[in-house]
């Protein structure tokens, strides 16, 4: 069993829900029993007249740890360009999903990619689902909202091993882009097939994702709206509301206070709003009305965005409110400290029982509360007196 996932991710409510560990598990013993994190399900083995749980993880190379983005800290990729963009084509739109559709449709047309894995919403039962799309029509139809959770990498093995895609784009949340970065940086040759198959990661700006139960418990039961009455779900860019637009034209709104308790626990300590590990990150923050902000962070991202502009599927200006993006990055620091504090608490509890861990706890305390070095103050970072 993966002790690291248990102690450093799941027990600290840090699981991002990407599902890459489940996809990469060689023995297929990881399963989703709840939305919070996957669990190891130990198959039973017959021993004489009785059955004993089989420890499938003993002789495993721990692929689950090898791919989990939450076991590492990720410095942001450097930003190559920030633009505000509008999708062109049959519909002119500045919505983030439409901008992403344009970039992917252009990439598919010119053969830069042969498939896309993304989250979508089943229009009949409003359940989020990970899909793989290959034609332009499928790509345009299937890039769905990224604010109802499903493990996006649930579709990975189907795309790579069943359908044989070799140049995939992954569209999802920033944490899933971190997962792509993690698997791409692995030295394990047995993960090479995944590494080779993923060509582009696109992240949507994200401050949290809701558990799918919100639809049944709030919309259906509390608001008395049947699933088949709903034409589409929408969320405000600042997440102040989520609303259901019904087929009869009326709108039912779920206010933030009601929706907040359905946010996945792993989002509470997430420190990446702006897709800092994605090739391209897209969102409305900082963009003028009718456009989306597009942050290009890698050469691959640059190639895809230029390609969409050359095909006249994307129109761009440099008119972005970068101060708004910087404010979001500052909020990230606050959450990162929250996450560090949580792991310090666990370490301190461990240290009570195991004196060998006390030095680790002290070191982590110092790291968390040390005073940053400022110009004009000599010496290294200090943990106590600020020298005021
Ligand atoms: S240790 Fe191996 S078998 Fe066990 S959950 Fe991780 S990948 Fe799967
Ligand atoms: S963050 Fe992703 S890889 Fe890590 S435990 Fe959660 S689902 Fe698995
Ligand atoms: S806030 Fe967004 S990026 Fe962060 S863990 Fe939640 S879904 Fe992932």
Image (cartoon, rainbow, N blue to C red):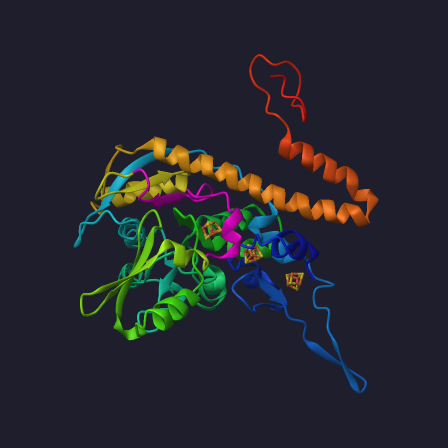
Q: Can residue 119 be seen in the rendering of this structure?
A: yes
Give the residue displayed 45% in from the left and 60% down from the top. 262
Q: Position of residue 264 (x, y in %)?
A: 49, 57
Query: Magenta residues: mostly which secondary structure?
Result: loop
Measuring 71% from the left and 46% from the top, which residue is drawn there? 347
Residue at far bottom of view: 49
Q: Magenta span has 33?
A: no
Of residue 111 and residue 94, the one placed in the foreground of this image is: 94
Please tell me in which quadrant of the rendered image residue 171 appears. bottom left
Residue ID at (48%, 61%): 151
Give percent across and percent down for residue 193.
53, 57
Most extreme residue toward the right is 355
Quadrant the C terminus occupies: top right
Left or right: 118 in relation to 75: left
Work out whether 27 lies above or below 358.
Answer: below
Q: Residue at x 66, y 57 (%)?
A: 6
How many numbered callouts?
Answer: 0
278 on left or right of 137: right
Q: Which residues are magenta?
A: 263-286
Q: Could one spot residue 302 in this view of the protein?
A: no
Locate the N terminus by quadrant: bottom right
Apparent side of residue 141 relative to residue 156 in the rendered image (left or right)? left
Measured as percent of width and height from the top left, residue 260 is found at 43, 55
The answer to which quarter of the image holds residue 79 is top left
Quadrant housing residue 190: bottom right
Expressed as whole percent of the image width and height from the top left, the position of residue 82 reads 33, 35
User: Magenta segment: does it hold 285?
Assistant: yes
């Amino acid at each position: 069993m993966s002790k690291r996932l248990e102690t450093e991710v799941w027990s600290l409510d840090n699981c991002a829900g990407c599902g890459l560990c489940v996809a990469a598990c060689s023995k297929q013993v990881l399963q989703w029993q709840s939305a919070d994190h996957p669990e190891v399900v130990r198959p039973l083995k017959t021993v004489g007249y009785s059955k004993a749980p089989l420890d499938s993880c003993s002789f495993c190379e721990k692929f689950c740890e090898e791919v989990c983005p939450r076991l590492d800290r990720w410095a942001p990729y450097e930003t190559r360009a920030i633009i505000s963009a509008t999708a062109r084509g049959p519909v002119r739109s500045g919505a983030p999903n439409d901008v992403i559709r344009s970039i992917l449709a252009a990439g598919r047309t010119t053969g830069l990619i042969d498939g896309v894995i993304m989250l979508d919403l089943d229009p009949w039962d409003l359940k989020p689902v990970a899909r793989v799309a290959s034609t332009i029509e499928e790509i345009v139809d299937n890039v769905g909202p990224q604010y109802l959770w499903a493990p996006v990498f649930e579709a990975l093995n189907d795309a790579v091993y069943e359908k044989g895609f070799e140049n995939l784009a992954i569209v999802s949340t920033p944490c899933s882009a971190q997962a792509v970065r993690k698997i791409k940086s692995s030295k394990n040759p047995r993960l090479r097939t995944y590494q080779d198959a993923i060509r582009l990661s696109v992240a949507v700006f994200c401050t949290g994702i809701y558990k799918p139960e919100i639809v049944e418990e709030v919309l259906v039961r509390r608001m008395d709206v049947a699933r088949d009455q709903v034409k589409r779900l929408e969320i405000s860019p600042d997440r102040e509301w989520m609303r259901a637009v019904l087929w009869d034209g009326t709108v039912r709104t779920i206010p933030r206070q009601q929706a907040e308790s359905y946010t996945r626990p792993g989002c509470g300590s997430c420190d990446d709003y702006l897709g800092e590990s994605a090739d391209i990150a897209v969102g409305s923050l900082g963009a003028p009305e009718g456009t989306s902000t597009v942050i290009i962070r890698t050469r691959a991202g640059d190639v895809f965005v230029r390609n969409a502009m050359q095909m006249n599927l994307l129109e761009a200006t440099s008119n972005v409110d970068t101060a708004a993006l910087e404010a979001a990055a500052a909020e990230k620091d606050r959450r990162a400290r929250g996450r560090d504090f949580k792991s310090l608490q666990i370490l301190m509890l461990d240290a009570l029982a195991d004196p060998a861990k006390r030095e680790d706890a002290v070191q982590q305390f110092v790291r968390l509360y040390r005073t940053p070095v400022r110009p004009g103050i000599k010496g290294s970072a200090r943990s106590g007196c600020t020298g005021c």
